[in-house]
Image (tube, rainbow, N blue to C red):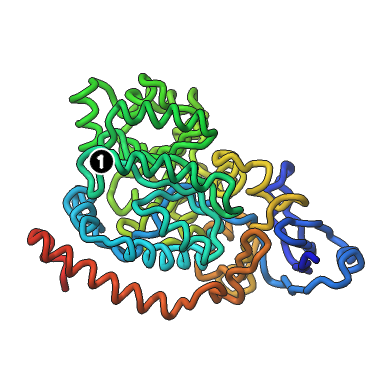
């Protein structure tokens, strides 16, 4: 018999087609689905055996979808902060010292942090993705997952990475309700054109998406210009790679014409507000949206961002675009919430199951504590969610009908033990990296 629970007397930001916000409302969950929503007392009659949760002083949102991250990189927190070309000079040399066990443990740590910060689904790619996937299942976190594929330059390259990326998709398609496998070429400058074309072909044949980095650095842009005489987005367009099933992280070094290509192709640029701001070069996300591009939001990795709390990222998203454009009305709160719920759900092919509080949808949801001083008084609920709340206000998280965070406590792993592991394994990783690369000696403190 399906377990049923009711969250009563709460505020629901439904993100349904009418974008209704329901006060004094109740929501019933049966099994892995939202069973019913009501503003009356009828749910207790319909589900007399349900477990009751009191939602007073709280706001329930659809589960938040982090459209670009690497949860397994948690052992490398902050190492590229304020480092010019940190990807090439620091991140890749450190990654050469990673073991498969490091990556699995790192995924447990990063995934736990993501859940505690309000994320119910990550769009993720990294090396040794099998271990990352097992960590995700252990935690009860939903994921759109891909094994990182690089043909040149990076820490793990070669034909075996290409084959593993394709095999991963075939192994995991339909295998587990929390896992949606995608293909994950790393970037335009690290994956050869023939590999990109092959992956585009496989993605279409297998009915899966493509997740990669695009125009994330000046070096990437320069490489593509030297080899193909175009920008990174134009290059992908010219080889027929772009489409609605493509999530393109960063898209910082692009021009106006390439913004139009995103809008025309349906491909999704991913804005990573804090990581972009900390490196001094934000994506022109509001301009892309104004041109019709389907921009989404991600945290990227903690190597460059330092935290995985998607709720906290939303404030930076709005503030950053207002500052960049000089327009205080740029990227309003309602649009920010759409980008991490309904828009992201549609982009990953789950718009009919995720991203809104609607009966019949999967029961992925987040409950925020809104009764504290920080959120009072409330004149505009959505503005308060974006600009007054942080990851520390996440009270409860449910994924696929299972409560994975309750009363701000992780239910599927020991957060205290994971924090200890992060210290131990993180320092061991950096020690090994420094032993291999003397130029990294400054990292060891």
Return the x and y of residue 114 as percentages of the image width and height. 48, 62
Relative to residue 354, is residue 360 drawn left or right?
A: right
Residue 248 locus on image (x, y percent): 41, 38
The residue sitting at 32% across, 65% down in the picture is: 102
Q: Say which quadrant the N terminus sits in.
A: bottom right
Residue 380 shows in the view: no
User: Residue 207 is drawn in which quadrant?
Assistant: top right
On-image quarter of the C terminus: bottom left
The answer to whether 260 is drawn above or below residue 117 in the figure is: above
Q: Where is residue 72 in the image (x, y as percent from the top left)?
A: 37, 59
Give 226 or 402, whichever is nearer the viewer.
402
Residue, far left: 438
Mark 1 sits on what residue? 158
The picture quadrant where one finds residue 24 is bottom right
Observer-nearest residue: 186 or 194? 194
When the figure is inspected, residue 394 is found, relative to residue 242, above or below; the finding is below
Residue nearer the viewer, 349 or 340: 349
Q: In this view, does 377 lie to the left or right of 432?
A: right
Q: Residue at x 81, y 71 (%)?
A: 50
Could you say where residue 365 lies in the image, as x and y percent from the top left?
A: 64, 59
Q: Is residue 161 left or right of residue 123?
A: left
């Amino acid at each position: 018999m399906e377990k049923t629970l009711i969250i009563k007397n709460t505020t629901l930001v439904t993100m349904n087609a009418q974008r209704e916000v329901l006060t004094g409302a109740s929501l019933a969950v049966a099994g892995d689905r939202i069973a019913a929503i009501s503003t009356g007392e009828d749910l207790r009659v319909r589900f007399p055996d349900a477990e009751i949760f009191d939602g007073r002083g709280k706001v329930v949102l659809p589960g938040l979808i982090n459209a670009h991250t690497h949860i397994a990189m948690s052992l490398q927190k902050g190492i590229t902060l304020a480092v010019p070309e940190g990807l090439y000079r620091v991140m890749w040399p450190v990654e050469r010292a990673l073991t498969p066990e490091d990556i699995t443990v790192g995924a447990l740590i990063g995934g736990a942090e993501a859940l505690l910060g309000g994320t119910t689904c990550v769009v993720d790619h990294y090396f040794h993705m099998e271990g990352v996937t097992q960590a995700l299942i252990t935690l009860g976190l939903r994921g759109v997952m891909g094994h990182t594929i690089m043909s040149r330059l990076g820490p793990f390259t070669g034909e075996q990475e290409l084959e593993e990326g394709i095999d991963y998709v075939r192994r995991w398609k339909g295998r587990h309700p929390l896992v949606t496998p995608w293909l994950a070429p790393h970037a335009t400058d690290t994956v050869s054109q023939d590999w990109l074309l092959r992956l585009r072909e496989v993605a279409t044949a297998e009915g899966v998406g493509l997740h990669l980095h695009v125009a994330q650095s000046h070096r990437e842009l320069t490489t593509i210009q030297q080899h193909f005489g175009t920008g990174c987005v134009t290059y992908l367009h010219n080889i027929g790679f772009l489409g609605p099933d493509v999530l393109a992280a960063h898209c910082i070094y692009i021009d106006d014409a390439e913004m139009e290509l995103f809008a025309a192709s349906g491909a999704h640029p991913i804005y990573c507000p804090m990581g972009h701001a900390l490196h001094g070069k934000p994506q022109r996300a509001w301009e892309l949206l104004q041109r019709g591009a389907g921009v989404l939001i991600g945290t990227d990795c903690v190597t460059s961002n330092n935290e995985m709390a998607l709720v906290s990222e939303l404030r930076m998203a709005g503030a950053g675009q207002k500052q960049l454009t000089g327009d205080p009305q740029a990227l309003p709160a309602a649009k920010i919430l759409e980008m991490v719920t309904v828009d992201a759900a549609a982009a990953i092919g789950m718009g009919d199951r995720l991203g809104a509080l609607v009966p019949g949808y999967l029961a992925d949801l987040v409950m925020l504590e809104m009764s504290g001083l920080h959120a009072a008084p409330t004149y505009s609920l959505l503005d308060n969610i974006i600009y007054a709340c942080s990851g520390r206000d996440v009270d409860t998280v449910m994924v696929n009908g299972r409560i994975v965070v309750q009363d701000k406590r992780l239910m599927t792993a020991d957060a205290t033990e994971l924090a200890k592991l992060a210290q131990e394994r993180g320092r061991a990783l950096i020690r090994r990296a420094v032993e291999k690369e003397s130029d990294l000696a400054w990292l060891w403190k």
